[in-house]
Image: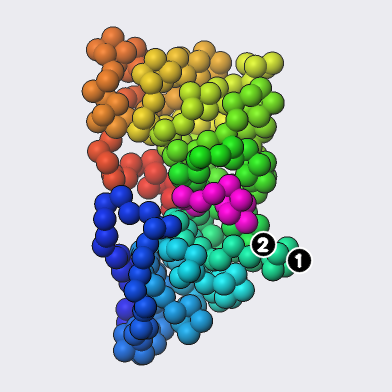
Amino acid sequence: MLTRFELHRGGLKNEHRKSLTWPHVIPQPFLGGVLSPTLSYLSLNGVPTDWSGSVLQNLTTFDIRRLPATHSPDVHRFREVLMNCPRLQKLSMDGAGPKFEEENTEHLPPVELPHLRTLVIADFSRQYAMFLFSLISATAVNDLTLMNLCGDDYLPLFLQLHSAFPKVRLLTTYSIQFDVGPQCLAAMTRWLDSMPNLCYLRVANVANQFFGLFFRRDNLGNPVSPHLTVVDCQSIEPVILLQWANDRKKFGTPLHKIYISEGLGARLTSEQISELTGLCTLAKLPRGTTTPEEEKLSL
């Protein structure tokens, strides 16, 4: 009757998946080889898996992390796993995914995931991230996380994602990198425009120009993401946050609530706190805490 299983491999705190060195692995049958027909939630973090011999089907949550290419499934097996999970609601790939076999998939249609609501893509090169997104079609995604996509200009990825997720309401952007030239910023704004229902933003470690994406230089009276009311800021220059909140109100789309990390809260002066609380509700958010607004939007 097992429904949820998570296995997290320990390791050095700063261990990177590309430097993982695993000895020869002798596969052991999960649960002694007994099938668990009710298993629907599977999370494997840094765990070597015999993909060819595994029985992965009917999952609603599939979460894989920290896998080097040598221990990743080939792309055809990965597609098979996804197709065997027609009710999949959450897919998380954090430094783990299929082997990069672009030439073997260019003529294959993306796997349709009509029930996918949460998608997490993290810690990939630009080329690989674009490859991953080409493998799936998930237009019903409500909660999109893009994290640790840096070290290169990821603008081509955001161009690829234009109109791919029209129903997103929760967007997380941690450590994303893109060219900040005028044409590139306009393209990034068009990407945000393709998610018209966005109302909750989590953001950290992005260029200050990211916040300018929510305003059109040639039409300030028509702000981007008009339904955006809640923002979770883990890291931002206090002056930028204050200016952004003021501008959102000035141009007709005020923020209702700003969540700040304890570290950011310590950097705000009493004058800045007073001005922010005059614009919207300001609340500190301990690390790992789920907000009421997030819970409501996730239903």
Q: Nearer the viewer, residue 177 or 269?
A: 177
* Above or below, comparing residue 286 to residue 71 in the picture: above
Q: Is residue 126 magenta?
A: yes
* Quadrant in the picture for residue 284: top left
Q: Are marks 2 and 1 in contact (CB under 8 Å)?
A: no
Q: Nearer the viewer, residue 123 or 260?
A: 123
Q: Which residue is mark 2?
A: 102
Question: Which quarter of the image is occupied by the N terminus?
Answer: bottom left
Q: Earlier in the sequence, mark 2 or mark 1?
A: 2
Q: Looking at the picture, which amino acid does disc 1 mark?
A: His
* Above or below, comparing residue 34 to residue 266 in the picture: below
Residue bounds of the magenta highlight: 121-131
Instruction: Write the residue at 53% across / 36% down.
Output: 177
Instruction: Write the residue at 61% across / 51% down.
Output: 127
Using the rendered image of the protein, determine whether residue 112 is visible from the camera's viewpoint.
no
Which type of secondary structure does the marked residue at label 1 adopt? loop
Cα gap from disc 2 to disc 1, whole angstroms:
10 Å
Q: Looking at the picture, which amino acid does disc 2 mark?
A: Glu
* Above or below, comparing residue 183 to residue 194 in the picture: above
Query: Residue 7, percent across and down?
Result: 31, 69
Instruction: Write the residue at 48% across / 23% down.
Output: 208
**Which label is found at residue 107?**
1
Query: Residue 247, percent across and down?
Result: 50, 15
Query: Residue 270, percent across and down?
Result: 24, 12
